[in-house]
Image (tube, grey):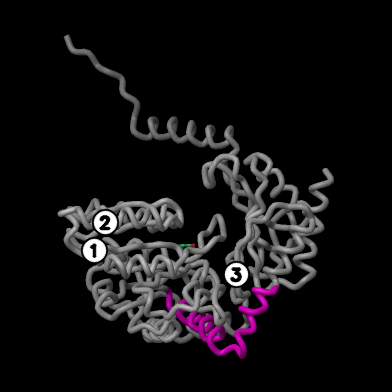
Amino acid sequence: MTTTTSRQSGIEVFEERSAAIIKQLEQSGQLKTLQMIEGPMDANVRVRGYGEVVCFCSNNYLGLANHPEVNAAGIEGIKKYGAGTASVRFIGGTFTPHETIEKTLAKFYGVEAAYTFTSCWNANEAIFPTLCEPGDLVISDELNHASIIDSIRLMTTIKKGVHKAVFKHSDLGVLRSVLEASRANPEVTGAIWVVTDGVFSMEGDIADLPGLRKLCDEFGALLVVDDSHGTGVMGKTGRGTHEHFGMKRSQIDFITGTLGKALGGAAGGYVAGPRNGIELLIQRGRPTLFSNALPVSVACSANKAIELLMQEPKAGRVVRLRENVAYARAEIKKAGFDVLESPTAICPIIVHDTARAIAMSKKLLELGVYVIGFGYPVVPEGHARLRVQISAAHAREHVDKLVSALKTLKKV
Ligand SMILES: *Cc1c(COP(=O)(O)O)cnc(C)c1O
């Protein structure tokens, strides 16, 4: 006798399982809803169902996302080169605007070379699996961006014998002990890499780059900085977190960053550093070998954004951003809120409770102020916050609108 087991089909198993996960997200208040933006990203944006609201949740730090010259450069790019590259870089996807923006990036940072990817996520995913070899060790700050974490995981999966370690956020003492242990580890025979975000996206705090450099020098390690939130924001001329500390660029071995934040905000990322490192990424970086080039229109618009930043007299936009940040922090504090101290454009207002953060951000949107609340599990339990991001595009009245809405919330 044969027995037939009734087995659900694959799609049935999947439907049941995914519905349960989504329901669980909904019940625990973690289900995200996508707001629909109906016009350009600027100090004010048009949000479907809410009309014109002041935007405090974009990465448009320098207000270049909708700058007329940046827009025009992208349009010119399409006119001259068309909409698509239809190829990866090493086959037929390298157009002159790629060469131009990569030269501009190298000049901006004062490095030998730079290479673009379709995102900083991809740039980070390329760097460690490509550049590290067996016997190397990569040591990462525990609060580094998800793309760095995944890059390191991928690296240890595809290259056997590469080691990884994590150090407590910004804790140089713990990093020192990891470095000391690596000295005694006979399996660590190659290069040691220390990687950190320049500006940490949830806290808005910055890495102690001088301290990290000193430790790296002591132990002969390379220093890699992902300055996605620091580029265009930190330092006198917006070169990034190293400039904030008055460090020479050569004190950072590799910089990764995004074109999707201060530098025009479209999309794309890059690695900047020594020529051989860039050459290896071109030769062997899987996210560039097997995935299309940065769209040419974006190469053109982002290049214009970087040029505007470099050419601006007295770094006007960077200065305006810094003044806006100082004003916003002072006013938010005066209104009786607990805002984390830092020199960056990220001002987290700590409200502790996740449900409260989400309710506040909903209420703020109704009051015409667009701010996102982050709670557990994005940040530790009890540390829920409203993450306010300041832009050079804001005027005083935009910040005043935020503060007055916050005061209204205090009353209810
Ligand atoms: C935003 C961000 C990224 C991702 O950049 P994309 O270009 O949008 O992929 C990577 N690293 C850090 C530190 C970031 O803040």
Instruction: Tell me which label, 2 or 3, sits earlier in the chain.
Output: 3
Pointer 2 with pointer 1, Cβ within 8 A: yes
Q: To which residue does mark 2 refer?
A: 155
Q: Amino acid at mark 2?
A: Met
Judging from the image, what secondary structure is the residue with disc 3 in? loop
Q: Is residue 403 left or right of residue 150?
A: right
The residue positioned farthest toward the top in the image shown: 1
Q: Nearer the viewer, residue 85 or 183?
A: 183
Q: Quadrant of residue 251?
A: bottom left
How far apart are labels 2 and 1 at the CA level? 8 Å
- Residue drawn at (40%, 85%) of the image: 110
The residues colored magenta run 295-323
Task: Say the numbered circle drawn on residue 60.
Answer: 3
Task: State if disc 3 and disc 1 touch (CB < 8 Å).
Answer: no
Give residue 33's position: percent from left, percent from top. Answer: 60, 47
User: Which quadrant does the C terminus fall into?
Assistant: top right
Q: Nearer the viewer, residue 325 or 258?
A: 325
Q: Which mark is nearer the camera, 2 or 3? A: 2
Report the predominant secondary structure element of the magenta stretch.
helix
Q: Amino acid at mark 3?
A: Asn
**Residue 322 colored in magenta in the image:** yes
Q: Position of residue 107 (x, y in %)?
A: 42, 86
State the separation of the CA atoms marked 2 and 3.
32 Å
* Residue at numbered disc 1: 132
